[in-house]
Image: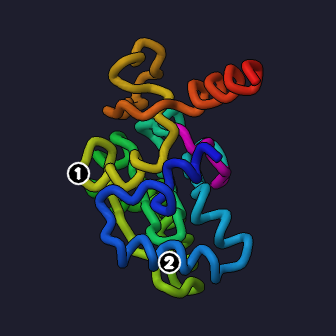
Amino acid sequence: MFNLRRSQFVQVFNNSPDETAYFRMLLNRENITNAAVMIQPSLISYSFNSLPQPALLDVASISADRILLLDSYFSIVVFHGMTIAQWRNMGYQNQPEHQAFAELLQAPQADAQMIIEERFPVPRLVVCDQHGSQARFLLAKLNPSATYNNSSDIAAGSDIIFTDDVSLQVFFEHLQRLAVQS
């Protein structure tokens, strides 16, 4: 319910009526797996410490030493944490002693390419870095549990979202209050 409320199917701001109709038509035509990805995107985390694994669709999943792959059906986002982006810009992946780093960079790209090849209509691929202008494609889909209003509890290397939208926790607290009142 929380993700549906924030999706392009309900929030039509910045979309033309044609785009809104197109998104809703595709939602009605796709199978349940693809429709679920449209409503609640999947987020996969890549790091040196573990194999690729699902991550929470939350701003707390952002870390300087991770690469995130977001599949929101209409777009695929490969998001590099700050440290990963700096190492990539320095060219560490091209040095033989940093082969593991080159493989870490390649893994989400290969997974994104596999998703793109299997899906019709073809999703837009966005490759971005933490604090970069294209990072908005990831940040718009994440739960804003750390915002400029409550940024005291964030971990080092994490991020905050500049939004007035409510977090999942606030949304559930409000639903609980409404359920108790009636």
Give the numbered dot on residue 148: none
The residue positioned farthest toward the top in the image shown? 152
The front one of 175 and 181 is 181
Q: Quadrant of residue 176?
A: top right
- Secondary structure of residue under mark 1: helix
Report the residue at 45% width, 76% height from top. Answer: 21
Report the residue at 50% width, 62% height from top. Answer: 9
Q: Quadrant of residue 154?
A: top left
Cα separation, mark 2 vs mark 1, equals: 22 Å
> Principal SS element in the magenta part?
loop
- Secondary structure of residue under mark 2: helix
Q: Position of residue 77 (x, y in %)?
A: 43, 61
Within 10 angstroms of label 2, few (less than 14), some, or many (20 or more) residues?
A: few
Q: Position of residue 134 (x, y in %)?
A: 28, 55
Within 10 angstroms of label 1, few (less than 14), some, or many (20 or more) residues?
A: few
> Is residue 33 covered in magenta?
no
Q: Amino acid at mark 1?
A: Ser
Q: Is residue 27 visible from the viewing direction of this image?
A: yes
Residue that badge 2 annotates: 113
| In-image side of 134 versus 112 (left or right) | left
Residue that badge 1 annotates: 133
Which stretch appears magenta?
A: 51-58
Report the residue at 42% width, 12% height from top. Answer: 152
Q: Is residue 108 above or below residue 176?
A: below
Q: Is residue 92 visible from the viewing direction of this image?
A: no
